[in-house]
Amino acid sequence: MNVLVLYQSRSGHTRRAAEAIGEAARALKGEAVVKSVIEVGEADVARADVLFVGTWVQGLILFAVKPAGAELWVPALPPLGGKPVGVFCTYAFHPRGSLRALGAMLTGRGATVVGERAFHRSRPGAGAEAFVRGVLEAAQGVGA
Ligand SMILES: Cc1cc2nc3c(=O)[nH]c(=O)nc-3n(C[C@H](O)[C@H](O)[C@H](O)COP(=O)(O)O)c2cc1C
C-alpha cells in the first residue's frame, strides 16, 4: 500500500506531525512519501493508495478558527479522485471545526475522508501510529 502524506506548515510542527505519520505508515505498511502541499504533483497522487493531508490551525482561538491557508492550497492540489484520505492538523489551543472544514474541502476535490486527528503542537507525533492504523483499516473499505 503506497501512502502519501501532504502537509502545510509555517513553523515546523505540522511537518513533524506529517513525518511521524510517514514513519508510522512505513512501520505498518512499508511505503510512505512525505511532501509539502506545494511540492505535490499528479503522479504522486496517482501512485498513492491512501493520502494523509494536514495543516495548522489559524484563527482567534475561539472565533474564525480554520485550516490555515486551505482556501489557497486545496484548490491547487491535483484531483484526489476518490482516494481515501486521513485529515490532520496541529493546534495550540483547540482545533474547533478545522478538521471538519478541511475534510469538506478535500471531499470537494474528490477525496473520501476516512479519518481525522488533531495533534497538539507540543507533541506533534503523539498518537500518530493509532491514527495511521485506523485510516489504513478504513481505507480498505474504500477499495484502496
Ligand atoms: C497567526 C496564528 C494564528 C493561530 N491561531 C490559532 C488558533 O486560533 N487556535 C489554535 O489552537 N492555534 C492557533 N495557532 C497555533 C498554531 O496552529 C500551532 O502553533 C501550529 O502547530 C503551527 O503549525 P506549524 O508549526 O506547522 O506552522 C495560531 C498560530 C498562528 C501563527
Image (tube, rainbow, N blue to C red):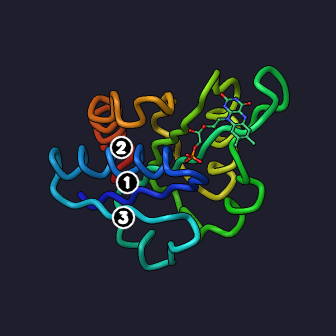
For image coordinates 44% across by 65% down, the residue present is 35
Classify 10 Å Cα crowding around label 3: few (below 14), some (14-19), many (20 and above).
many
**Residue 107 point in image, percent of width and height:** 63, 48
Q: Give, as a three-letter code, the residue at label 2.
A: Ala
Please say if the residues under marks 1 and 2 sit with CB atoms less than 8 Å apart.
Answer: yes
Q: Give, as a three-letter code, the residue at label 1.
A: Val
**Residue 20 point in image, percent of width and height:** 32, 45
- In the picture of the structure, the residue carrying the numbered disc 3 is 48
Does residue 110 sit above or below 67 in this rendering?
Answer: below
The quadrant in which residue 137 appears is top left
For image coordinates 36% across by 43% down, the residue present is 139
For image coordinates 56% across by 51% down, the residue present is 11
Q: Nearer the viewer, mark 1 or mark 2?
A: 1
Q: Residue 50: which disc?
A: 1
Q: Give, as a three-letter code, the residue at label 3.
A: Ala
- In the picture of the structure, the residue carrying the numbered disc 2 is 139
Does residue 141 sit above or below 71 in this rendering?
Answer: above
Please say if the residues under marks 1 and 3 sit with CB atoms less than 8 Å apart.
Answer: yes
Q: Distance from label 1 to label 2 (Cα)?
A: 7 Å
Q: Quadrant of ligand 1?
A: top right
**Residue 132 point in image, percent of width and height:** 32, 38
Q: Is mark 3 within 8 Å of ligand 1?
A: no
Front one among 19 and 135: 19
